[in-house]
Structure formats: C-alpha cells, structure tokens
Image: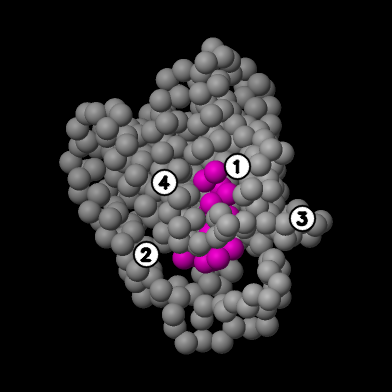
C-alpha cells in the first residue's frame, strides 16, 4: 500500500535498532583494514549515496507525495545533528573501538539511550517517568563497571570514556533531529550521510589516512547504506511518531544485538566485568522500554509540522 512503508513508530524503532546494532561488529571488522576516521567517512558516504539512489530510482514506491520540504529554519537543527551525530560521534566511537572488544563496545552504546532520554527531558521537556529515572542510574552503574580498568593508572579506560562521549553526541543528534523529523526522512538521511561523509573524508585526508584496497572500500560503503542509511531513515520515522525519549526506549535493543553478533563473529570469552555489567544493562534497558508516556497532563499550544493525508484524522498520545 502506498505510503505505508516506515509507517509504524515502534516497528521503525526496532528496525533501526537491528540495523544500527549490526554496525559495531561490522565496524570492528572494517577497522582491521581501514583507518578509523576513514571508516566513519565511508560508512556515511555509503549511507548518503545509497539513499540518493533510492530517491532517484524507487522514491515513488517507498515514500508518500506529501512529505514536507526543508526550509531555512530547519538548517540549524540539520547542521547541528550532522556535526554531533554524523561527524564527531562516529569518529570518536571508531577511534575508541580500535582498542575495545566489539561486544563490550556494543554494551556501552546503552549510554546513547540515557543521553537521549536525559536531553529530551531536561532540555526539550519530554516527560520522564519513574522507571526511566530508575533505569538511568542502573545503566550508569553498569557502565562504571565496564569502564574500570585495574591495569590502567587512571583506573578508567580512555577508550570506554570515548565511547560514552560518542553516545552523548548521538544523544544530542537524536534530539536535534527530532525537531525536523516531520520532514522527508529519506531526504534528511541522504543529506546527513553525504555531508557527514564528506566532512569525515576531508579530515581523513588531512590526517594522511592510508586508503585501503577497493574491495574494502566497497564493503564499507555497502555496510554504511544498511547500518547507517536505512537505520537513520527508520529512526527518523520513529522520532516523528514517538518522540526522542520513547524512540530511544525501543532502540535499547541495538546494543544487545551488537553484543550477540560480536560474540558470534569474534568468539572469545568476555571477562568477569562483562558478565556483571550485562544484567544491569538488560535491567536498565527493560525499564526504559516499559516507560510509558501515559500520565495525565496538559500540553501547551502545539504547532503541527508534519504531513496529513486528506480525510484522515489522528490523535496525539497524552
């Protein structure tokens, strides 16, 4: 049916989580052949170019004709999201991922949920209920356990701190993107992928990063289309339906998908810290997923900025 693809908020959030969850172990594989900054560039370029092909070739099959176009007032949100989530976060993550097991890094990505939820609540005034308030310190405690490195004189692993910093910037990105989620998600993700990819590529060239074999470049581009490009489209559609905080609750599945795939791909046996932190992360993610925006309250005046189908009425959750 025309216009129904990407139509359900929870389904879109879960699809985004699955695709993004795959990105961490796949990126770890790519780091064996490609410089971290260049990996970030290729993943986003693959995202942008792949979605541009979608726009040109099959746009009518997967998008409605009622998507809103971008205006000049959208640029600050778009540029901020690109810099925070398209340039800074992936570069910091991939540099840190080079010295952290993929399964552990995947678990750390739970901090993106915490960052998104806190920013949505404290800055953008989205509701934060009791379960979310309980989940945040639980996830933080799990992160502290994973971060402790007895062999380091600083006690906390710099790589772990880098992953947490990347999650903070993705949290900023998620909330900024929420402000323009009513616009065409494919166009938005295409612009984000191409711009972020070009900026990261320029940084990689400036740093004299060596270019790998064509096969490795092609693999990174294809991986970027699926794990970043399609994931961003689904995520933006979910933001439109659910808001930043609730989308992040469904997105809690991503770290565990990445952890499971990492253990399958790389084998090995995680240390004791991993198994202590794992149930805490699961408990925190479960609490966030159960968080319901169902309390009684009043909203201020709302300005609608999303497409409506003629003759179709919809209700907003309270």
Earlier in the chain: of badge 4 and badge 1, it is 4
The residue that disc 2 covers is 288
Disc number for residue 86? 1
Q: What secondary structure is found at the residue carrying circle 3?
A: loop
Magenta segment includes 245 = yes
The outermost residue toward the front is 1
Colour scheme employed for the rendering of this structure = one colour
Q: Secondary structure at mark 1?
A: helix
- C-alpha gap between disc 4 and disc 1: 19 Å
- Residue 223 counted in the magenta span: no
Between 286 and 232, the one nearer to me in the picture: 232
Q: x, y percentage for residue 246?
A: 46, 65
On the image, numbered disc 4 is attached to which residue? 18
- Mark 2, mark 4: which one is toward the viewer? 4
Q: Which residues are magenta?
A: 230-246
Q: CA distance from mark 4 to mark 3?
A: 28 Å
Which label sits in the foreground, 1 or 3?
3
Residue receiving disc 3: 70
């Amino acid at each position: 049916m025309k216009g129904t693809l990407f139509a359900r908020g929870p389904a879109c959030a879960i699809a985004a989580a699955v695709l993004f969850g795959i990105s961490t172990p796949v990126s770890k594989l790519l780091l064996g052949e490609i410089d971290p900054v260049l990996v970030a560039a290729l993943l986003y370029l693959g995202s942008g170019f792949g979605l541009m092909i979608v726009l040109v070739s099959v746009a009518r099959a997967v998008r409605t004709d009622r998507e809103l176009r971008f205006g000049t007032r959208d640029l600050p949100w778009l540029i901020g999201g690109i810099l925070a989530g398209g340039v800074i976060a992936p570069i910091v993550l991939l540099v840190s991922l080079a010295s952290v097991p993929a399964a552990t890094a995947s678990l750390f990505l739970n901090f993106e949920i915490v960052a998104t939820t806190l920013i949505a609540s404290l800055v953008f005034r989205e509701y934060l209920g009791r379960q979310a308030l309980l989940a945040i310190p639980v996830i933080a405690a799990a992160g502290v356990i994973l971060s402790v490195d007895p062999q380091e004189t600083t006690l906390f692993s710099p790589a772990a701190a880098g992953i947490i910093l990347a999650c903070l910037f993705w949290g900023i990105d998620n909330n900024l993107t929420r402000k323009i989620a009513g616009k065409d998600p494919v166009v938005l993700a295409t612009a984000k992928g191409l711009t972020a990819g070009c900026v990261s590529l320029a940084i990689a060239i400036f740093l004299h990063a060596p270019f790998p074999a064509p096969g490795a470049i092609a693999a990174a581009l294809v991986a970027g289309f699926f794990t970043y490009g399609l994931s961003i489209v689904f995520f933006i559609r979910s933001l439109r339906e659910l808001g930043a905080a609730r989308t992040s609750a469904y997105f809690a599945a991503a770290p565990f998908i990445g952890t499971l795939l990492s253990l399958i791909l790389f084998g090995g046996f995680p240390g004791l810290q991993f198994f202590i932190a794992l149930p805490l992360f699961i408990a925190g993610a479960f609490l966030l997923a159960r968080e319901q925006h169902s309390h009684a309250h009043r909203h201020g005046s709302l300005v609608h900025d999303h497409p409506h189908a003629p003759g179709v009425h919809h209700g907003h959750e309270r």
